[in-house]
Amino acid sequence: MASTGHVEEPKNFAPKNPPKLDPPKSDPITVEELAECDGVDESKPTLVAIKGTVFDVTGNASYAAKGPYRVFAGKDASRALAMSSVKPEDCRPDWEDLPDKEKTVLDEWMTFFSKRYNIVGKVVS
């Protein structure tokens, strides 16, 4: 995490050691259920959502309670990821109004996550 409040944009989408991922799930996950999976309670998975798709990032200390990207855990962090921001106020699901450049960054993050983490569901209202 840089002191400017920005995170590096993903440049290399393929992981060095690709994990064996499970088939994507489309289980409904409420915003409240997602919020409970914020990396604080180690008995629950740590989840991050992008554009409504929920990824299980459990095991990556960066998203745990004291990790540099903990701000994303338990939320749909689409806007923050698109803006390369780690500001809590930017961790929200709305991204459609962003400029095309930031939408491209968000798509890159979606690709980055999809190559590294299991998709465990979809955020529902």
Image: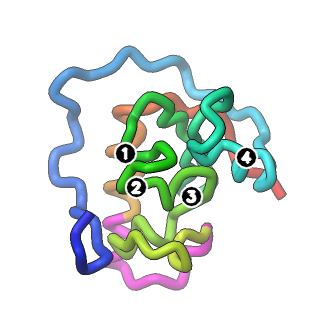
Identified by mark 3, the residue type is: Lys
Residue 59 percent location from the top left of the image: 44, 28
Label 1 near label 4: C-beta < 8 Å?
no
Pair 2/3: label in front: 2
Q: Secondary structure at mark 4?
A: loop
- 50 or 7, which is in the foreground? 7
Mark carried by residue 62 = 1
- 44 or 27, which is in the foreground? 44
Mark 3 surroundings within 10 Å by alpha-carbon count, few (fewer than 14), some (14 through 19), many (20 or more): some
The answer for how far apart the CA atoms under marks 4 and 1 are is 17 Å
From the image, tell me which residue sits under label 4.
36
Residue 93, image quadrant? bottom right
From the image, tell me which residue sits under label 2.
69
Label 1 near label 2: C-beta < 8 Å?
yes
The answer for how far apart the CA atoms under marks 2 and 1 are is 5 Å
Pair 3/1: label in front: 1
Q: Residue at x 67, y 31 (%)?
A: 44
Identified by mark 1, the residue type is: Ser
The range drawn in magenta is 93-105
